[in-house]
Image (tube, rainbow, N blue to C red):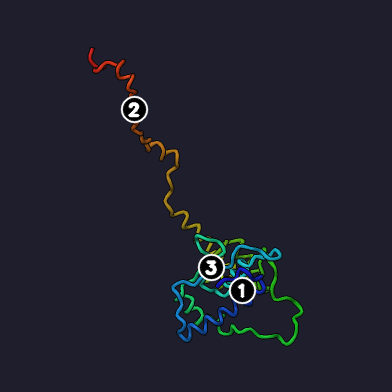
Amino acid sequence: ADFRKLSAGAGLVGLTLWLDHMQDASLEGSPESPKSIVLITGTAEYNMVSLNSTLKAFLWEMGAPFLPCKTRTGILVAKAHSLKMWLKDSPFCFDLELKNAPSVPQLNSMQLVEGCFIRRGLVPAFKDIISRLGEVYPKKFAKLALLSDQMREKAIQIDMEGKKMKLKHLPRKVPQSQERRWQHPKRRFIRRTVPSHAKKILPENPGRR
């Protein structure tokens, strides 16, 4: 699915409709999907808002199995089987249909944070998780975002302590200066050709006198 020509707001609407259609297809079993599902978001910004970051935050909040492509920016990839299971079992996918509100809300449900639209109630948790743990996997982000402030604080502390313990047990790398001492430079063999006029001047057996 290609969302590159849409703004961030239109992209959220289009993504919700696309997920609804994908859910129907997964329940009915047709049409068959490829092994990998690709979302093309691009890297452009519309009115200083990133479509890629907005859709990624929306999918991360729901725990969708989409991950950034390792070789190209602006592309999100998910395995077809993982996406089908998520669409069937995730509580976020029980009601994906768009509905018209009876009245206009007083406040916008989305808030602009760091160049992307995020649900207003998720902003404090988003800032806390990103600032302390960096970019995490969707399932982990969704679990942390749904926790209370106290439970999230404990979970983040445990995660950070676990990372420190892993770093302590990792084998130390040998400094590059010591590695270079044991590395002998490879010598290149260059065959020199003697000009024809020099052969006449040089003796036939220079080693004998």
Residue that carries the numbered disc 3 in the rendered image: 76
Residue 4 point in image, percent of width and height: 61, 68
Q: Mark 1 packing: few (<14 Cα in 10 Å), some, or many (20+)?
A: few
Residue that carries the numbered disc 1 in the rendered image: 148
Mark before the other along the chain sequence, 1 or 2: 1
The answer to which image quadrant residue 181 occupies is top left
Mark before the other along the chain sequence, 3 or 1: 3
Residue 184 point in image, percent of width and height: 36, 35
Residue 194 point in image, percent of width and height: 33, 24
- In the picture, which quadrant includes the N terminus? bottom right
The answer to which of 170 and 16 lies nearer the viewer is: 16
Local secondary structure at mark 1:
loop
Q: Is residue 13 visible?
A: yes
**Of the residues shown, which amino acid type is indicated by label 1?**
Ser
Q: Mark 3 packing: few (<14 Cα in 10 Å), some, or many (20+)?
A: many
Classify residue 109 as left or right of residue 196: right
